Amino acid sequence: MIRPGSEGEAMNDGTEAPKLEAPMAAESDEAAESWQMFANCLGVDPDLFFPERGASTKEAKQVCQGCVVREDCLEYALANGEKFGIWGGLSERERRRIRRQRALARAAQQSRTA
C-alpha cells in the first residue's frame, strides 16, 4: 500500500500515521518506487489501508486483489519492516507469519549446511 503525501498525518483514531522508511540503500529511489505508479491503491484514501484495531480489512484487501504490483508491495513491506496497515493484500499479522516462516526456513537451511 502506498500513501503519497500522508506520512505523519493524523489517522482516524487520532494517532499519527507511521512514517514510511526509506528504500534499501542498494536500490535507487527511482527503482524502489517505480512499482508504486502501477498500484491499484494509487489515489485511494490511505485510511482504508490503516483500519482501527478490530475493524474490517476486507475493502482494502479487495483493492489489492488482482493488483499487478501486489508482490512488489508485499516484499517492500517485508523488507522495510512495515508493522502497520495492509501491504500487498496482507495484514500486519499475516506479514508477521511470513517473516516467521522465512526465518525458520533460513535457520533450517543454515543448520543443513553447517
Image: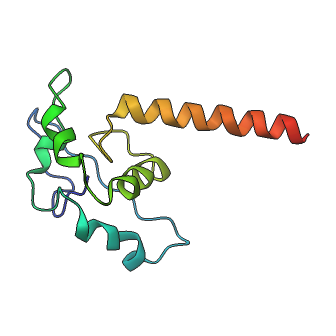
Point out residue 62 in the picture as x, y percentages from the top left corner. 17, 41
Point out residue 98 in the picture as x, y percentages from the top left corner. 50, 35
Residue at the image position 40 percent from the left and 70 percent from the top: 32
Residue at the image position 27 percent from the left and 47 percent from the top: 18
How many numbered marks are there?
Answer: 0
Above or below, 83 relative to 19: above
Side of 70 where 99 appears, left or right: right
Residue 5 sits in which quadrant?
A: bottom left
Residue at the image position 18 percent from the left and 58 percent from the top: 40
Residue ranking furthest to the top = 54
Residue ranking furthest to the front = 66
Side of 30 where 50 appears, left or right: left
Residue at the image position 32 percent from the left and 60 percent from the top: 69
**Front residue of 67 and 76:** 67
Residue 56 sits in which quadrant?
A: top left
Point out residue 89 in the picture as x, y percentages from the top left corner. 29, 42
Residue ranking furthest to the right = 114
Snapshot colouring? rainbow
Above or below, 3 relative to 108: below
Side of 32 where 36 appears, left or right: left
Point out residue 101 in the picture as x, y percentages from the top left corner. 58, 32
Which quadrant of the figure contains the C terminus?
Answer: top right
